[in-house]
Amino acid sequence: NMKKFLDAGTIVDIEVGLGPAGEMRYPSYPQSQGWVFPGIGEFICYDKYLEADFKAAAAKAGHPEWELPDDAGGYNDTPEKT
């Protein structure tokens, strides 16, 4: 639907939000799975593209040993517990 705008240069980039608060997680706050406010929700979406971008940024920052976290907390953790 936007092809003519892309071809004309009117639109130069399209960004897609990934998650209700933009953290690449969906659904991040499911009450059906036990989430209780003010739990942090859960970060649940890593893919090969995010990992590649992260590894490139880590190497550029001089830390190729950095890895994505596997302990970012669970649904009902509070920020200070993560």
Image (cartoon, rainbow, N blue to C red):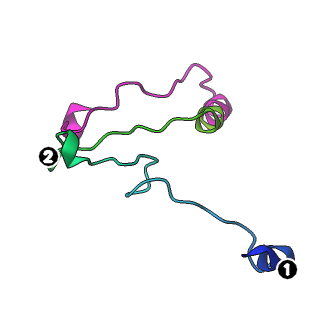
State the residue position of label 1: 8
Query: Disc 2 designates what residue?
Result: 36
Is 48 part of what is drawn in magenta?
Answer: no
Figure quadrant of the C terminus:
top left
- What secondary structure is the magenta-colored segment mainly? loop
Q: Look at the image and give the residue range highlighted in magenta.
A: 55-82
Closest to the observer, 55 or 14:
14
The quadrant in which the N terminus is found is bottom right
C-alpha gap between disc 1 and disc 2: 48 Å
Residue type (three-letter) at the residue carrying disc 2: Val
Residue drawn at (79%, 74%) of the image: 3
Residue at the image position 35 percent from the left and 25 percent from the top: 71
Q: Residue sitting at 47 percent across and 39 percent down?
A: 45
Residue 23 lies, in percent from the top left, at 43, 49
User: In the structure shown, which secondary structural element does the residue marked by tag 2 occupy?
Assistant: loop
Can you give x and y, in whole percent of width and height, for residue 37 in the image?
14, 50
| x and y, in percent, of residue 73 in the image | 29, 32
